[in-house]
């Protein structure tokens, strides 16, 4: 039993380290800067998803345009005229903050998408069941959370996503939604093609903030400074379920967004 506990603790630390080192791409967002810029074409090389922000309340620019991404069934933003928010959460491991997030979503009747990895499903199956039972979509964040842009063959790509599908089906009895989010926001054109070939839609984001570092959580004021000023119509919002701040502020955050005239919708509406 003691060995099992040590193994589990080691696995949690491993996934925490992977999220920390990879920075889950949220930290690639900087004030008014697009990192890296791709111009008006899709690069064949590996990229980190990045955003550039303009005036408050306006849609940010991304590494590629929405039109370019759509060729690969990939998205980062919705209709700039529609005051709708698509809530998404990346779930690398469970540390007690996901259920407060689910409570807040339930209170606001807001449906979200949770992108899960294999470790999350292995260690928090009951929470995964609750997500499904409460009408949320559960998407694929790969089994081991690797740099998928380093994978060049379809079979290796397929295994990373299909192993998640299989475990999710075993736990919930439901088929996983064909929604894919690249770990750390790292991707290539070939990755997008592979995901499309496997029937997946790829989802990046148009709003995130540095909430992934559990050892240096933003204050409520810091979170609101980013999430309220940068919200915009059609926003795909990336938050991390490991964030204590997110668990504490989500109810109030959703209320504030509603007061700004926004509604919440599942990614299926965007598609």
Image (cartoon, rainbow, N blue to C red):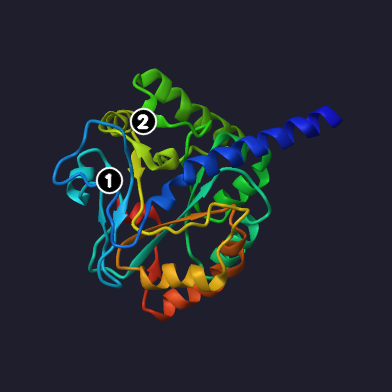
Instruction: Decide if residue 27 is on the left or right side of residue 81.
Output: right
Quadrant housing residue 207 = bottom left
Instruction: Decide if residue 162 is on the left or right side of residue 248.
Output: left
**Which quarter shows the N terminus?**
top right
Front residue of this view, candidates 191 and 170:
191
Q: CA distance from mark 2 to mark 1?
A: 15 Å
Residue 21 shows up from this direction: yes
- Identify the residue under disc 1: 36
Q: Position of residue 68 (x, y in %)?
A: 18, 44
Instruction: Decide if residue 164 is on the left or right side of residue 29.
Output: right
Residue farthest along the bottom direction in this orientation: 259
Q: Residue at x 35, y 46 (%)?
A: 203
**Mark number displayed over residue 129:** none
What is the count of numbered marks?
Answer: 2
Q: Residue at x 45, y 30 (%)?
A: 161
Q: Position of residue 67 (x, y in %)?
A: 17, 48
Residue 1 shows up from this direction: no
Q: Position of residue 102 (x, y in %)?
A: 59, 60
Q: Reply above or below: 243 against 12.
A: below
Instruction: Decide if residue 65 is on the left or right side of residue 184.
Output: left
Front residue of this view, candidates 263 and 186:
186
- Identify the residue under disc 2: 149
Q: Reply above or below: 76 against 45.
A: below
Nearer the observer: mark 2 or 1; the answer is 1
Q: Residue at x 56, y 53 (%)?
A: 241
Question: Is disc 1 placed on a helix, strand or loop?
Answer: loop
Q: Residue at x 42, y 58 (%)?
A: 208
10 Å neighbourhood of mark 1: few (<14), some, or many (≥20)?
some
Residue farthest along the left direction in this orientation: 40
Q: Position of residue 144 (x, y in %)?
A: 53, 31
Question: Is disc 2 placed on a helix, strand or loop?
Answer: helix
């Amino acid at each position: 039993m003691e060995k099992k506990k040590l193994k589990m603790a080691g696995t949690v630390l491993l996934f925490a380290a992977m999220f920390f080192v990879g920075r889950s791409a949220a930290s690639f967002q900087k004030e008014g800067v697009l990192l890296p810029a791709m111009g008006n074409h899709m690069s064949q090389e590996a990229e980190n998803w990045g955003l550039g922000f303009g005036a408050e309340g306006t849609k940010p620019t991304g590494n590629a345009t929405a039109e370019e991404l759509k060729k690969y069934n990939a998205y980062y933003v919705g209709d700039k005229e529609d005051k709708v928010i698509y809530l998404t959460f990346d779930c690398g491991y469970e540390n007690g903050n996901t259920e407060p997030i689910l409570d807040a979503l339930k209170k606001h009747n807001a449906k979200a998408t949770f992108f899960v990895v294999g470790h999350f499903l292995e260690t928090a199956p009951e929470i995964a069941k609750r997500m499904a039972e409460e009408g949320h979509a559960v998407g694929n964040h790969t089994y081991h959370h690797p740099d998928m842009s380093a994978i060049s063959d379809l079979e290796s790509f397929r295994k990373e996503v299909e192993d998640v599908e299989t475990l999710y089906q075993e736990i919930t009895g439901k088929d996983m939604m064909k929604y894919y989010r690249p770990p750390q926001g790292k991707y290539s054109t070939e990755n997008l093609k592979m995901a499309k070939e496997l029937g997946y839609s790829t989802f990046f984001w148009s709003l995130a903030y540095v909430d992934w570092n559990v050892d240096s959580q933003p204050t409520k004021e810091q979170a609101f400074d980013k999430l309220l000023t940068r919200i915009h119509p059609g926003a795909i919002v990336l938050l991390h379920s490991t964030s204590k701040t997110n668990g504490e502020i989500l109810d109030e955050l959703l209320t504030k967004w509603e007061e700004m005239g926004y509604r919440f919708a599942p990614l299926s509406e965007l598609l």
